[in-house]
Image (cartoon, rainbow, N blue to C red):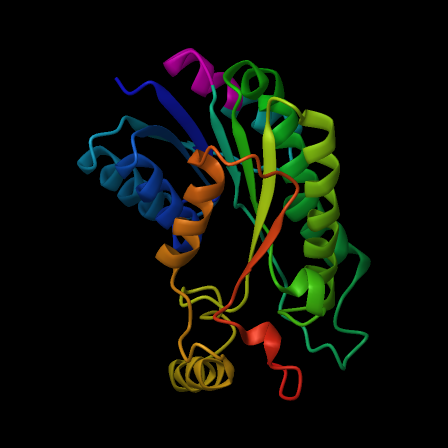
């Protein structure tokens, strides 16, 4: 059994799955949580096993505190500690920002419940054990939290709140736990697939790459590499919000 253990929420696909795989390859056992995509979560667990790590999946809704408590307890029962929490679980509702009637109060409540409250609850559930391990928390935020551009105003606002939550938790959990956030721009995952047809998605990727100074769309593995640096590195870094977007945020004259 490996000595280090990690919790990755929302790890059935995309960034969460890439982070779980990367942590396993780097020598961490992994709790993989998922919402609806059990098959994807099973594939992530298998990839962790293939990398030589122990891993198991839990169906959970991080907006429910009891689910966060159960995730933390399962890690403790299995491995005796928690070294890393990656708060990746997130949700959105695609809505045109020009249509102020497109979002309801219920939309805001659900998005904030998962994207903000869920991160707080998961971190709180693991906090004592993270402190004992001198561990790390990495929140998966978004460039939307700075730009206000994204799948919806509610999503962007939730990521702005997650950014400030990251700073607050970094202060509170210091000196033993480092808390940072990775803020991707558009990433080459299936996140946009429910909103765009295949041709439109290809066109969007091409436009994004053309705008970006580095001329490419980051992959989930690119984001996972940054997460690992925050999670496993020994540098005295906490309370940081690191944008991973191939430099798209520099394109002020032609914003995505």
Q: In this view, does 167 lie to the left or right of 123?
A: right
Please state, as top left, top right, bottom left or bottom right, where the N terminus lies in the image.
Answer: top left
| Picture residue at 51% right of the left edge, 67% below the top | 245
Relative image position of residue 195 (x, y in whole percent): 52, 74
| Picture residue at 77% right of the left edge, 80% below the top | 99
Q: Is 8 situated above or below 177?
A: below
Relative image position of residue 190 (x, y in whole percent): 41, 65
Depth order, front residue of 173/18: 173
Task: Specify the quadrant of the image occupied by residue 50.
Answer: top left
Task: Specify the quadrant of the image occupied by residue 127.
Answer: top right
> Farthest residue toward the front?
235
Please state, as top left, top right, bottom left or bottom right, where the C terminus lies in the image.
Answer: bottom right
Task: Specify the quadrant of the image occupied by residue 228.
Answer: top left
Q: Is 133 situated above or below 232?
A: above
Can residue 9 be seen by looking at this rendering?
A: no
Depth order, front residue of 120/60: 120
Q: Is 199 situated above or below 125?
A: below
**Is residue 50 highlighted in magenta?**
no
Give the main secondary structure of the magenta stretch.
Answer: helix
Depth order, front residue of 4/192: 4
Relative image position of residue 110 (x, y in whole percent): 70, 50
| Picture residue at 40% right of the left edge, 64% below the top | 189
| Picture residue at 65% right of the left edge, 23% below the top | 175
Can residue 229 be seen by looking at this rendering?
A: yes
Depth order, front residue of 177/10: 177
Question: Which residues fall within the magenta stretch?
Answer: 72-81
Relative image position of residue 239 (x, y in whole percent): 66, 41
């Amino acid at each position: 059994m490996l000595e280090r253990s990690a919790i990755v929420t929302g790890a059935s696909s995309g960034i969460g799955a890439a982070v779980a795989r990367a942590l396993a390859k780097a020598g961490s056992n992994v709790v993989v949580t998922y919402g609806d995509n059990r098959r994807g979560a099973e594939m992530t667990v298998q990839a962790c096993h293939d990398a030589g790590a122990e891993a198991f999946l839990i169906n959970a809704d991080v907006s429910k505190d009891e689910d966060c408590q159960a995730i933390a307890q399962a890690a403790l029962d299995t491995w005796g500690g928690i070294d890393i929490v990656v708060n990746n679980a997130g949700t959105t509702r695609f809505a045109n920002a020009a249509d102020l009637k497109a979002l309801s109060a219920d939309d805001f409540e659900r998005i904030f419940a998962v994207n903000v409250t869920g991160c707080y609850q998961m971190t709180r559930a693991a906090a004592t054990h993270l402190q004992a391990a001198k561990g790390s928390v990495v929140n998966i935020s978004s460039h939307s939290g700075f730009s206000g551009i994204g799948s919806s105003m509610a999503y962007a606002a939730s990521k702005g709140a997650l950014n400030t939550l990251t700073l607050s938790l970094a202060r509170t959990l210091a000196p033993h736990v480092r808390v940072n956030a990775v803020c991707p721009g558009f990433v080459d995952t299936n996140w946009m697939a429910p909103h765009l047809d295949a041709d439109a998605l290809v066109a969007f990727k091409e436009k994004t790459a053309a705008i970006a100074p580095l001329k490419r769309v980051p992959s989930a593995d690119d984001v996972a590499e940054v997460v690992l640096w925050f999670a496993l590195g020994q540098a005295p870094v906490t309370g940081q919000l690191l944008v991973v977007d191939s430099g798209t945020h520099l394109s002020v004259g032609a914003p995505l």
